[in-house]
């Protein structure tokens, strides 16, 4: 075997997966075609949950130091009507409202900066090898392992890498997915989109009226619910812009300067750095696993960059799959645990696409069709104010969870979904809210890389004995009771390596082994 796991694609998802595995002692080879990160701004908004991953990968500080917009400026968003300089505007994507339920603050920086930090961290881990300049060109598997054929982009040399598992993190047009026998279902919105990257200090001056904003969504009645979207790459000079364009649009047959002026509502000096196009669609793999072949990130799912879900969803794939692969390879969990990757992550993405991204497009479509300040100013203002107040918002409702997972104990009849409700209570399948232990230490600082049983003035001997019998890595974390820990609503909380709750109770059950067998995959 060349490695235990071979990862095709060294973007944020592939690198995150490699780091998750490498920190657990798993030998990994990452195959990445680009020697340096592509300098195209995308995947910029990193949620509080994503920043918890960077804490676990020991690079939170490095990531925050790499940001291109000063922390004191802010990373908030804003929605406007018709033009960027419109009198109608309100705050958008107020994820800071759910900050108390997570152990980290949000961050915002271009994806190529994130990739650079991840590359540096991966280079520090001895059991990770990265092959830059190579692309995956074929994949096959048998009962003993999987083979990934790779080709050097310049020389044309081919090699075959042998491993126990192959993971495709190689983008929306994934070779691993297509050749690994994993089909895909698409929901096409039939929209061609442009991505412009440009420099303009004058636009920064125009937008000084909106301090602390880093991205801007422009609603226009003519776009039928789709957006014009601006974002800062740095503070003061560089920007990106997404918007629908007619089919057949090329770099040479469209006036992109006039398009920007119309979206902003004013003319300004502009210098283009990049003009590219992409298709607005939602796509999802029909399975995230086929035997020894897995897909993650854009290889498993893709959607419009509406709401900052993309990179965050992909990194959650990496965290979910990484600890499970390591646990199975090291023998302390059963192979059935790997099936839970698809069972948990695929429904969550389907819900994210349906209940948040597509729903947002539909709601904006209904708004611009139903309200017009020229027709009825009072009705428009009332609905606009309701949107701005958060009455139409979904920040608290976006709470990806696995309460219907086959490796979570509890929640009969529930399903894995992105729709939930943030709570401090410890609930099976849900993310663990941070609390301080009686010692004053934050629980996230006390958790290790394995399963942890938080025992609040409770005996845990039955679980310890059951874990020893099953060979399951389990750490027991004892704490005295406190009013803060009482918010968990249970004296015993079983926490997975990815900081999701697997089981809760007030006493060790009679058959503690049955609980542990389920959470370890059988």
Image (tube, grey):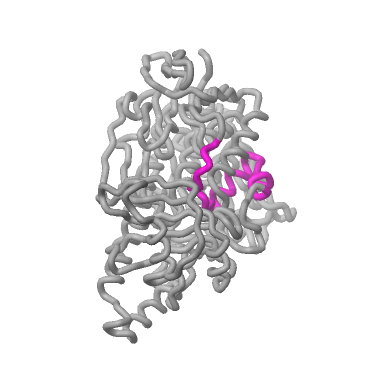
Identified at 39% across, 32% down, the residue is: 339
The magenta stretch spans residue 518: no
Classify 518 as above or below 304.
above
Q: Quick check: can you spot residue 280?
A: no
The magenta stretch spans residue 48: yes
Classify 137 as above or below 75.
above
Identified at 26% across, 47% down, the residue is: 248
Answer with the quarter of the image where residue 137 lies.
top left
Of the pair 201 and 473, the residue shown nearer to us: 201
Identified at 56% across, 73% down, the residue is: 209
Q: Position of residue 459 (x, y in %)?
A: 63, 45
Q: Which residues are magenta?
A: 37-65
Quadrant where the image shows the C terminus: top left
The total of numbered circles placed on residues is 0
Q: Quick check: can you spot residue 307?
A: yes
Of the pair 10 and 419, the residue shown nearer to us: 10
Most distant residue in the bottom direction: 378
Of the pair 255 and 466, the residue shown nearer to us: 255
Q: Is residue 10 left or right of residue 376?
A: right
Q: Position of residue 362 (x, y in %)?
A: 29, 62
Identified at 38% across, 60% down, the residue is: 259
Answer with the quarter of the image where residue 278 lies.
top left
Answer with the quarter of the image where residue 139 lies.
top left
Classify 171 as above or below 443.
above
Of the pair 430 and 85, the residue shown nearer to us: 85
Q: Position of residue 345 (x, y in %)?
A: 40, 42
Q: Position of residue 416 (x, y in %)?
A: 38, 48
Most distant residue in the right direction: 439
């Amino acid at each position: 075997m060349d490695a235990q796991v071979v990862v095709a694609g060294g973007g944020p998802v592939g690198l995150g997966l490699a780091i998750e595995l490498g920190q657990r002692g798993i030998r990994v080879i990452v195959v990445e075609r680009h020697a340096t990160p592509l300098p195209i701004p995308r995947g910029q908004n990193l949620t509080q949950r994503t920043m918890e991953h960077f804490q676990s990968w020991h690079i939170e500080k490095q990531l925050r130091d790499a940001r291109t917009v000063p922390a004191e400026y802010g990373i908030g968003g804003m929605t406007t009507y018709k033009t960027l300089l419109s009198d109608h505007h309100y705050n958008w994507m107020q994820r800071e409202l759910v900050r108390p339920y997570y152990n980290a603050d949000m961050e915002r920086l271009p994806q190529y900066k994130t990739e650079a930090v991840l590359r540096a961290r991966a280079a520090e881990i001895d059991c990770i090898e990265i092959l830059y300049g190579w692309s995956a060109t074929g994949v096959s598997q048998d009962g003993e392992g999987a083979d990934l054929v790779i080709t050097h982009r310049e020389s044309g040399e081919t090699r075959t890498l042998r491993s126990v598992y192959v993971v495709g993190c190689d983008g929306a047009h994934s070779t691993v997915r297509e050749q690994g026998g994993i089909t895909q279902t698409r929901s096409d919105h039939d929209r061609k989109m442009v991505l412009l990257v440009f420099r303009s200090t004058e636009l920064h001056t125009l937008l000084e009226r909106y301090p602390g904003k880093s991205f801007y969504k422009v609603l226009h009645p003519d776009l039928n619910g789709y957006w014009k979207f601006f974002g800062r790459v740095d503070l003061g000079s560089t920007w990106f812009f997404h918007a629908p364009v007619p089919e057949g649009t090329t770099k040479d047959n469209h006036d992109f300067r006039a398009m920007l002026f119309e979206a902003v509502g004013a003319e300004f000096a502009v210098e283009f750095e990049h003009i590219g196009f992409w298709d607005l669609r939602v796509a999802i793999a029909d399975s995230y696993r086929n035997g020894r072949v897995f897909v993650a990130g854009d290889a498993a799912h893709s959607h419009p960059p509406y709401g900052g879900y993309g990179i965050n969803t992909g990194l959650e794939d990496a965290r979910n799959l990484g600890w499970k692969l390591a646990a199975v390879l090291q023998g302390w969990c059963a192979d059935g645990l790997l099936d839970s990757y698809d069972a948990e992550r695929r429904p969550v993405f389907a819900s994210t696409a349906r209940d948040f991204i597509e729903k947002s497009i539909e709601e904006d479509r209904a708004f611009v069709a139903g309200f017009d300040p020229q027709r009825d100013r009072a009705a428009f203002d009332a609905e606009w104010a309701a949107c701005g107040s958060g009455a139409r918002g979904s920040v608290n409702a976006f709470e990806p969870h696995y309460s219907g997972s086959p490796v979570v104990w509890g929640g009969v009849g529930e399903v894995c979904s992105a729709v939930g409700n943030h709570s401090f209570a410890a609930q099976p399948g849900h993310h663990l809210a941070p609390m301080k232990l009686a010692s004053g230490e934050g629980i996230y600082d006390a958790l290790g890389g394995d399963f942890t049983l938080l025992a609040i003035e409770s005996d845990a001997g039955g679980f310890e004995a059951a874990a020893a019998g099953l060979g399951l890595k389990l750490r027991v974390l004892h704490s005295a009771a406190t009013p803060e820990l009482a918010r968990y609503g249970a004296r015993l909380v079983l926490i997975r390596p990815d900081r999701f709750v697997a089981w809760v109770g007030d006493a060790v059950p009679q058959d503690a082994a049955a609980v542990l067998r389920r959470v370890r995959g059988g």
